[in-house]
Image: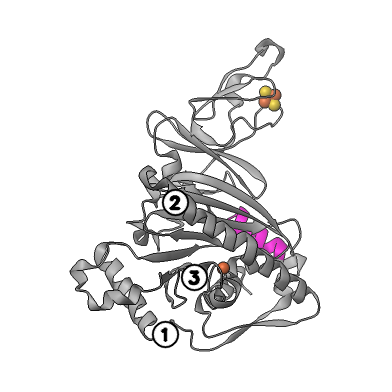
């Protein structure tokens, strides 16, 4: 967001805190519980939302410099993203042409990638450079590159297509409706604190929904998030994506201040939800990326949570913010999602989504619409 957009959003937040209210939907809605239990629905979501839709897997800052690389596991597939010396971004399946082992781990700087198993070596474009005992293999080097995938960082985020046949234009266009809102968050300069992986006994949509509303702050997060943040939220929709924001307690005091003295960033958190269920939270100094995906059965999911920081001089502050985020997510949100899944599996036929959960409503409609249900 530019300064004017930021101040507009801030004015709405201040008004919501001052009036102790939040943006609302027009009516309550209900959702069918079988959507969280059905293997048929889960198979369609897996194929359509995850395998055939571009996925946001990281911050562009993770692969900003020539010679940098990052790895990720997406839908159980190992992915390698590199930036070559000509600044060109590449994405590949991180699986060696010899016997499939990974050729890179973690992230950092690396111009050559040597497989730990038998030493086959690739360049940043995934081309095979060398292999021990080459004379024992009749296949020529040229046909043994890593499998290439479409990738884009035009939004400041790393977006990949898991299907090698996905057109490049689809990954380029995936965030086109919302990407103008990302300016000012520094996703292109983000360094990584760490990535955590969680196996969760709950449908991925139940996990995602916890990041779509502040209704649970005062109860589930009364000892963590609610100590710092006001639950009064504003939301906006951008094509297939959404954004909602909440501010630090006391932000309404800015109301008495001339706007020229307001901060250039939202003193709170701006949570973008990106299709199908990726959460991107930006704060004045940090960012978090929560990537939830379906597990092997409808009642399981896998979540990858990456913490990013912009300014090395404020690393300690960033670490503290990350620790609070992990504490709330792992200790409070995920158990709540698992509890919900257990309850829904026990015979309830529908769940309710209140007027005060407009972003949850948006996403349930969005998922249904995308599946043609
Ligand atoms: S699996 Fe990579 S060199 Fe053998
Ligand atoms: Fe939460």
Residue at image point 53% right, 79% down: 357
Q: Is residue 140 left or right of residue 110?
A: right
Q: Position of residue 250 (x, y in %)?
A: 36, 74
**Crowd rating for badge 1 (residues with CA inside 10 Å; few <14, some 14–19, many 20+):** few
Labels 3, 2: front one: 3
Residue 339, picture quadrant: bottom right
Q: Residues within 10 Å of mark 2 (few under 14, many from 20)?
A: many
Residue 20 badge: 1
* Residue position for label 3: 227
Using residue 153 as the reference point, say whether residue 52 is left or right of it.
right
Quadrant of the drawing holding the N terminus? bottom left
Instruction: Name above or below for residue 301 compared with residue 32.
Output: above
Separation of residues labelled 2 and 1 (CA atoms): 29 Å
Relative side of 367 to 287, left or right: right
- Nearest to N terminus: mark 1 or mark 3: 1
Residue pictured at 54% horizontal, 45% vertical: 194
- The answer to which of marks 2 and 1 sits earlier in the sequence is 1
Rendering coords of residue 315 (x, y %): 42, 46
Q: Nearer the viewer, mark 1 or mark 3?
A: 3
The segment highlighted magenta reads: 42-53
Q: Is residue 209 magenta?
A: no
- The circle drawn on residue 318 is 2
User: Do tag 2 and tag 1 residues touch (Cβ < 8 Å)?
Assistant: no
Q: Position of residue 350 (x, y in %)?
A: 70, 82
Q: Is mark 3 within 8 Å of ligand 2?
A: no
Residue at the image position 54 percent from the left and 74 percent from the top: 217
Label 2, ligand 2: CB separation under 8 Å? no
**Mark 3, other Cα within 10 Å: few <14 / some 14–19 / many ≥20:** few
Relative to 283, does residue 169 appear above or below in the rendering? above
């Amino acid at each position: 967001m530019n300064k004017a957009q930021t101040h507009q959003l801030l004015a709405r937040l201040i008004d919501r805190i001052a009036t102790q209210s939040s943006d609302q939907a027009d009516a309550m809605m209900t959702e069918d519980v079988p959507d969280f239990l059905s293997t048929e629905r889960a198979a369609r979501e897996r194929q359509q939302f995850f395998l055939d839709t571009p996925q946001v897997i990281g911050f562009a800052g993770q692969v900003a410099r020539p010679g940098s690389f990052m790895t990720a596991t997406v839908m159980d597939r190992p992915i390698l993203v590199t930036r070559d010396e000509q600044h060109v971004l590449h994405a590949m399946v991180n699986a060696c042409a010899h016997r499939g082992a990974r050729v890179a781990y973690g992230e950092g700087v690396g111009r050559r990638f040597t497989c730990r198993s038998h030493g086959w070596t690739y360049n940043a474009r995934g081309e095979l450079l060398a292999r021990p005992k080459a004379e024992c293999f009749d296949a020529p080097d040229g046909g043994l590159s890593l499998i290439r995938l479409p990738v884009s960082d035009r939004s400041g985020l790393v977006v990949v297509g898991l299907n090698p046949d996905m057109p490049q234009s689809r990954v380029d266009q995936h965030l086109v409706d919302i990407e103008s809102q990302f300016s000012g968050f520094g996703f292109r300069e983000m360094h990584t604190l760490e990535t955590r992986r969680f196996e969760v006994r709950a449908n991925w949509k139940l996990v995602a929904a916890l990041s779509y509303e502040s209704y649970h702050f005062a109860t589930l997060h009364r000892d963590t998030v609610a100590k710092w943040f006001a639950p009064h939220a504003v939301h906006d929709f951008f094509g297939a994506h959404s954004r909602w924001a909440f501010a630090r307690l006391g932000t309404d005091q800015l109301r008495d201040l001339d706007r020229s003295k307001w901060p250039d960033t939202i003193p709170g958190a701006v949570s973008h939800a990106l299709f199908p269920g990726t959460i991107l939270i930006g704060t004045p100094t940090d960012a978090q990326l929560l990537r939830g995906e379906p597990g092997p059965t409808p009642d399981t999911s896998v979540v990858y949570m990456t913490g990013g920081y912009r300014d090395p001089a404020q690393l300690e502050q960033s670490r503290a913010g990350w620790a609070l985020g992990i504490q709330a997510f792992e200790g409070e949100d995920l158990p709540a999602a698992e509890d919900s899944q257990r309850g829904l599996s026990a015979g309830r036929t529908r769940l309710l989504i209140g007027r005060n959960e407009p972003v949850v409503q948006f996403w349930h409609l969005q998922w249904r619409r995308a599946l043609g249900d």
